[in-house]
Structures are given as C-alpha cells and as structure tokens.
Image (cartoon, grey):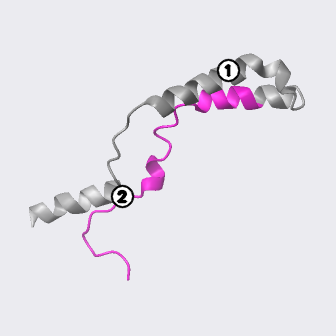
Amino acid sequence: MGKKAGGLYINPKKFGSLTKPCMKEMISFLNCLSLNKVNDEKCVRQKELLSACMDAQATQNRKPWGSINYHLQRLNRGRK
C-alpha cells in the first residue's frame, strides 16, 4: 500500500489546468446569462461562440496518450 520510495510520480491534478480550450467562451456566456437573469435570447453571440469552439474541439482528432504516471513508470523500467 502506498508509493515506493524513490519512484517517479506526478500528481495529474496539477496539470489539469493546462488545457481548457473553451474556457473564455464559456465564462463570457455564463457572465452574460447572469447579467441578463438567465435570458439566453440576449446572449446569442456568446452562445454561438461557445458552440463554435465546442464543435471545433469535437472535430479535432486527438490521440490519447494515457496517464503521465503510466509513461513515467514505463520509462523508469527501461533505466533499471
């Protein structure tokens, strides 16, 4: 139970803030909603920008690399 002494380990939660592609669009849309008392008819522009950003993210072909800790362990095995 627990980590081995001297093993490589990175907390992936610290790197969760690196890629948030549509955060600005989402914040502007939510701010518009809060200013207009949840009336999305007045926030059409922000809604379109958010939808366009989300559609662009969905069409990107990203290759899953797995967790960073898996790759650190794999590289560490080669050093022994």
The residue labelled by disc 2 is 10
- Direction from residue 21 to residue 72 in the image, left or right: left
Q: Residue furthest bottom?
A: 1
Q: In the rendering, at what x and y percent does residue 58 appear? A: 50, 33
The residue labelled by disc 1 is 48
Q: In the rendering, at what x and y percent does residue 26 appear? A: 66, 31
Neighbours of disc 2 within 10 Å: few (<14), some (14-19), many (20+): few
Residue at image point 44% right, 47% down: 15
Q: Judge whether 16 appears above or below 76 on screen.
A: above
Q: Residue furthest top?
A: 45
Whole-Å distance between the Cαs marked 1 and 2? 37 Å
Q: Quadrant of residue 9?
A: bottom left
Q: In the rendering, at what x and y percent does residue 59 appear? A: 46, 30
The answer to whether residue 21 is magenta is: yes
The answer to whether residue 64 is magenta is: no
Helix, strand or loop status at disc 2: loop
Residue at image point 26% right, 56% down: 71
The residue stretch that appears in magenta: 1-30
Q: Judge whether 64 appears above or below 34 on screen.
A: below
Residue type beneath disc 1:
Glu
Neighbours of disc 1 within 10 Å: few (<14), some (14-19), many (20+): few
Helix, strand or loop status at disc 1: helix
Q: Judge whether 69 appears above or below 57 on screen.
A: below
Q: Earlier in the sequence, mark 1 or mark 2?
A: 2
- Direction from residue 38 to residue 5 in the image, left or right: left
Residue type beneath disc 2:
Ile
Q: Quadrant of residue 48?
A: top right
